[in-house]
Amino acid sequence: MGGSLAGTIYGPLICGDAIDQNPKNHTLLSGSQTPEEPLQLWDLRTFGLIKTFDWKGIDPNGSSCIYSCKFVRPSKHAILACGSNKNQVKIFSADTGDMLFNMSDIDPIIG
């Protein structure tokens, strides 16, 4: 009790398990239920945006709504995120923002 608001981050619409923090470098990872800018990294000291990860890549229709994202342990230099719409799983470098892995279910089996 008696605490005060330290700061606010505007933008992401968090659903599911789509938020994680890295206390070593004071960053917050957010996965958003919005098709634009769905995966972002924030500075917890300034509450400013550090980077937006390029989820679409070369596919202009490749956006997803993120429902889970985490820093990959133990080094936390990679980010694992899962998105709906195309049932995608991607891994990004937390340092460079480069996509390291992409798996997508664009042709689901209907049974």
Image (cartoon, grey):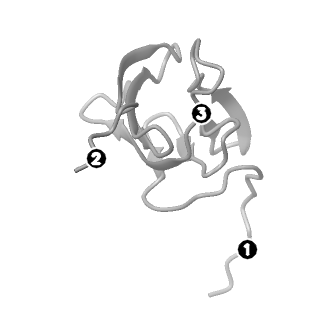
Report the disc number at residue 110.
Answer: 2
Q: Residue at x 53, y 18 (%)?
A: 97
Report the disc number at residue 4.
Answer: 1
Along the line of sight, the residue nearer the viewer: 106 or 83? 106
- Of the numbered discs 3 and 2, the one sitting upstream in the chain is 3
Residue for badge 3: 63
Mark 3 and mark 2 residues within 8 Å of each other at the beta carbon: no
Mark 1 and mark 3 residues within 8 Å of each other at the beta carbon: no
Three-letter residue code for mark 1: Ser
Crowding at label 1, few (<14), some or many (≥20) Cα neighbours within 10 Å? few
**Residue 61 located left or right of residue 79:** right
Choose mark 3 or mark 2, whichever is in front: 2
Q: Is residue 93 above or below residue 70?
A: above
Mark 2 and mark 1 residues within 8 Å of each other at the beta carbon: no
Q: CA distance from mark 1 to mark 3?
A: 36 Å
Crowding at label 3, few (<14), some or many (≥20) Cα neighbours within 10 Å? many
Q: Which quarter of the figure has residue 74?
A: top left
Three-letter residue code for mark 2: Ile
